[in-house]
């Protein structure tokens, strides 16, 4: 007898058309302009939350970890995300400053993978990111204690209300508990799915002489 999960998944479509085309021979020499092109196209075509990306890290024991974070910015220099400086991911990145990022834009059948070293941005840049946020988001960051066990939900409500009062009373307030990290890719792969045909994959690799490009078997 099939398992309930297998039954639920039977016949669920994946990579539903129409999907955009991707001509790797016309791709730019570096990954950032292609990311910008794809992000622009994702936003134009109504992809939901294109800035939600998977962040993979490795802990002290070598065990991989993964969660979704928001892309705060990207330039040719790297991809930026923000988090609680005392969170498990921040500790993992301090111990092992390397990570991978993954975007999945399912409405377009697209995936982007980035791997590379991670640097923590300076305090001023993190403070700027903090101040650019809405009061509710700033209050949530001030509450902190990310991923600590929560014994009682009312403690969170009280901490959030108190943080919101602080943010409202002092709009210039910042906190060292807000960390901003920059992933500088040494490898970037763009994947375009295609139902019934071979998918198209283009991988950029950083070398001393600049970026190289190659297509990959799907
Ligand atoms: C759509 C989405 C966006 C998120 N954005 C962030 C973010 O930008 N920063 C963050 O610290 N956590 C974000 N989270 C929560 C993380 O996935 C995660 O639960 C939290 O950061 C704790 O991770 P850690 O225990 O590995 O440190 C987001 C979750 C989702 C589903």
Image (cartoon, grey):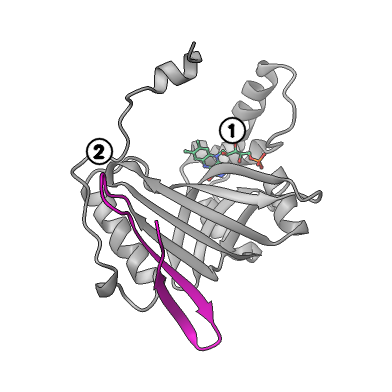
Q: Confirm or deny contact between disc 2 and disc 1 (CB under 8 A).
A: no
Residue toward you, 30 or 49: 30
Q: Mark 2 points at which residue?
A: 16
Q: Give the numbered dot on residue 165.
A: 1
Nearer mark to the viewer, of 2 and 1 = 2
Region of the chain picked out in magenta, as a range: 193-218
Residue 79 included in the magenta stretch of the image: no
Q: What element carries label 1?
A: helix
Label 2 to label 1: alpha-carbon separation = 47 Å
Q: Position of residue 208 (x, y in %)?
A: 56, 86
Task: Specify the quarter for ligand 1.
Answer: top right
Whole-percent x, y for residue 77 in the image:
49, 73
Quarter containing the C terminus: bottom left
The 10 Å Cα crowd at callout 2, few under 14, some 14 to 19, many 20 or more, is: few
Left or right: 114 as drawn, with respect to 124: left
The answer to if 217 sits in the magenta stretch is: yes
Q: In this view, does 101 lie to the left or right of 123?
A: left
């Amino acid at each position: 007898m099939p398992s309930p999960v297998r039954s639920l998944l039977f016949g669920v479509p994946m990579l539903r058309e129409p999907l955009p085309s991707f001509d790797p021979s016309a791709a730019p020499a570096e990954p950032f302009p292609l990311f910008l092109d794809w992000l622009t196209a994702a936003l134009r075509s109504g992809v939901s939350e294109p800035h939600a990306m998977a962040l993979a890290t490795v802990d002290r024991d070598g065990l991989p970890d993964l969660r979704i974070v928001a892309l705060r910015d990207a330039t040719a220099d790297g991809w930026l995300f923000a988090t609680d400086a005392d969170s498990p991911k921040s500790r993992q990145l301090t111990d092992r400053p390397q990570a991978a990022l993954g975007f999945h834009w399912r409405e377009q059948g697209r995936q982007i993978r980035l791997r590379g070293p991670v640097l923590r941005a300076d305090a001023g840049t993190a403070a700027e990111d903090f101040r650019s946020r809405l009061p509710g988001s700033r209050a949530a960051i001030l509450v902190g204690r990310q991923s600590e066990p929560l014994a009682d939900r009312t403690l969170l409500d009280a901490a959030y209300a108190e943080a919101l009062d602080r943010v409202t009373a002092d709009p210039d307030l910042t906190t060292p508990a807000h960390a901003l990290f920059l992933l500088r890719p040494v490898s970037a792969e763009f994947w375009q799915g295609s139902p019934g045909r071979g998918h198209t994959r283009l991988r950029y690799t950083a070398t001393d002489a600049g970026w190289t490009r190659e297509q990959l078997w799907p």
